[in-house]
Image (cartoon, rainbow, N blue to C red):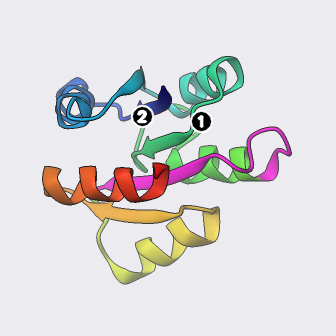
Amino acid sequence: MKKILIVDDQKEVRDLVEVTLRVGDYQVFKAKSGEEALEIVKAEKPDLIIMDIMMPGGIDGLEATRILKGDPQTKDCRVIMLTAKGQEADKEKGFEAGADEYFVKPFSPLELIKKVEDILG
């Protein structure tokens, strides 16, 4: 079973993404901050992370992605940015940090599940 980590400071968004992913056979983990995400990634080694950018605390989604992609043990984990930051410059920052895909909120659940299935095969 593939593991997916959903990282967003808003519980409603975490829950919506989790419900969206129920169509597949995934083990879902949730984190509300970049710090919490890094802990879960080290413990669970998810196959995919769906990451918000703007989160409270010292580590936002961009920094968390940079950390994960810079660590030999987690560099192969795929990251989909799912964020309200939709400007072209924001997307560039996301890809520079190491994101594999970039979705802007509000998002299409069907498009998200299609992308998840494409990435996880």
Q: Amino acid at mark 2?
A: Val
Residue 22 x, y percent position in the rendering: 22, 29
Residue 74 x, y percent position in the rendering: 74, 41
Q: Which residue is mark 1?
A: 58
The structure residue drawn at horizontal position 44% and vertical position 54%, both measured from the top left corner, is 80
Of the pair 31 and 35, the residue shown nearer to us: 31
The structure residue drawn at horizontal position 27% and vertical position 30%, both measured from the top left corner, is 14
Report the number of discs: 2
Instruction: Report how far apart the C-alphas of labels 2 and 1 lie in the structure.
Output: 15 Å
Q: Which mark is residue 7?
A: 2
Q: Nearer the viewer, mark 2 or mark 1?
A: 2
Q: Is residue 99 left or right of residue 114?
A: right
Of the pair 2 and 83, the residue shown nearer to us: 2
Q: Which mark is residue 84?
A: none
Residue 79 x, y percent position in the rendering: 52, 52
> Is residue 74 shown in magenta?
yes
Dot 2: element: strand
The structure residue drawn at horizontal position 62% and vertical position 71%, both measured from the top left corner, is 96
Above or below for 23 versus 60: above
Residue 24 x, y percent position in the rendering: 28, 34
Question: Magenta segment, which residues?
Answer: 70-83
Q: Amino acid at mark 1?
A: Gly
